[in-house]
Image (tube, grey):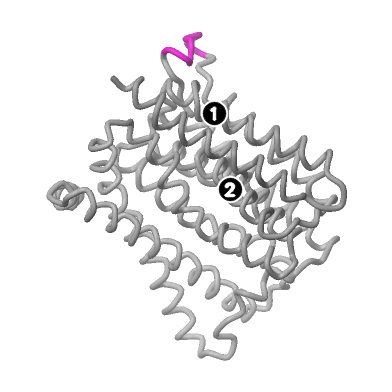
Amino acid sequence: MEEALEQFFARQNNWALAIEIIAILGLLGKAADWLVGEAVVLSERSGLPKVIIGATIVSLGTTAPEVAVSVLAALQGQPDYALGNAVGSIICDTGLILGIACLIMPLKLPRQIVNRQGWLQFGAGWLLVAACWPWATGDNPFQAGGNLPQWLGVVFLVLLIGYLGLSIRWAKSSVQVAELEEFERDVAAPMGVVIVKLLVSVALVVCASYVLIPAIKVAAERMGVPGAIVAATLIAFGTSIPELVTAITAARKGHGDLAIGNVIGADILNVLFVAGMSATVTPAGLEAPKEFFRVQLPSMLLILLVFRVGVTLSGERMQRPFGGVLLALYAIYLVLSYALLGELKH
C-alpha cells in the first residue's frame, strides 16, 4: 500500500502534489479537532472533573497528529522523519504560533505557568539534545549525527506519566477550565454517537498520517532536500494546526495566558510523548542526522532560550515586538533549513 501511494504521488505534477499535501494536512488538523472534542465529551460523561480533562485529554489530543505521523514514520522505516516532526513542532509552536498570537493581541503572561512549566519546557529541549548525543561512540555529532535509542524512548514515556500527574496536581491548584469551552460539543448527543465520532476521528488521524508520509517523501526528493528537513518544517507546521487554532482563538478572546500555557505544554509533550513513543516502537531508535545538530537542534534551543529570556524581561504581557522577534527567528530557521541543508545534502 505504501509503495502504491508513493507511485501515485510520483505521477503528480508539482502543483497537484502541493495541493494534495495541503489537503491532507487540513484533514489531519480537522480530525484532531474532532478527536479532542469527542474525547472531552466522553470524559465528561464518565464523570471526570474538567480540571483533569484539561490537563490530560486536551493536551494529549492536540498532539495526536504529531504522534500519529511520527510513530507511523518510525514504523515505516523513516525514523529521521519522526524526530524531525517532533523537533520542528517545538520550533513551530514557540516561534510561529506564539509569534502570530502575540501580534494579534499582547498576551497576558501566566507567571505561575511560565515560572513552573516553562522551565520544564526549556529542560525538555536540552534533554532531547542530550538523549540524541552519541555519548557511547564518542563520535562528533556534527559530522556523524546521533541517535535517540529505544530505551531512552521508554524513559521519556515514564517521564510523561510523571508530567501528566504533575499537570493534574497543578491544574487542581489553579483551576483553569476556560480552555475547554471550545471543545464542549455534542454534550447531549447519545453515547453511541459520541463513541462513533471518536473512532472515526481517530481513524482519520491515522489514515491521513499514513498517506502523508509517502507524499512528503516524494516532495522531499523533488526539492532536493533531506526528507527529515521537510518533516521538521512543512509537516511540523501541519501537525501543529490544532495548537495554532487554539492559540489564535485564545488570543482573540483575550485568553492569552491559555495560548502560552498550551504551547508550553505542547513543547513538553513533543519531547516526552512524540519523540518518546516513536523511539519506543523502533528497535534501532530514532536517527538524528548530522544536519539536525547543525541547524534543527541549535535552532530549537535558541528559540526556547529567547522565549525564556523574553518572558523574564516582559511585564504583565508579551508585547507585539516580542512576537515579531519570535516570527523573525522562525523565518531565519526556515531559510537555513532549506538553503543550507539543501546544499549539505549534495
Can you give x and y, in whole percent of width and height, for residue 198 in the image? Answer: 46, 73
Q: At x 36% / y 66%, what residue is drawn?
A: 204
Q: Which mark is residue 33?
A: none
Q: Residues within 10 Å of mark 1 (few under 14, many from 20)?
A: many
Residue at 58% across / 33% down in the picture? 300
What residue is rendered at 56% in x and 58% in y?
244
Q: Is tag 1's residue or tag 2's residue first in the polypeptide sequence?
A: 2
Q: Is residue 198 above or below residue 162?
A: below
Q: Position of residue 223 (x, y in %)?
A: 28, 36
Q: Is residue 210 left or right of residue 317?
A: left
Q: Position of residue 43 (x, y in %)?
A: 61, 74
**Mark 2 highlights which residue?**
93
Q: What SS does tag 2 mark?
A: helix
* Above or below for 12 versus 195: above
Q: Residues within 10 Å of mark 2 (few under 14, many from 20)?
A: many
Q: Is residue 138 magenta?
A: yes
The type of residue carrying mark 1 is: Leu
Quadrant that contains the C terminus: top left
SS assignment at label 1? helix
Q: In the displayed structure, does residue 237 sit left or right of residue 72?
A: right
Vertical arrangement, residue 170 with respect to residue 27, above or below = above
Q: Is residue 303 above or below residue 181?
A: above
Main SS, magenta region, reads: loop
Residue identifier under label 1: 297
Whether 86 is among the magenta residues is no
- Residue extent of the magenta highlight: 136-143
* Residue pictured at 60% horizontal, 63% vertical: 246
In the image shown, does 63 or 194 lie closer to the viewer? 63
**What type is the residue that disc 2 sits on?**
Asp
Distance of label 1 from label 2 (alpha carbons) = 15 Å
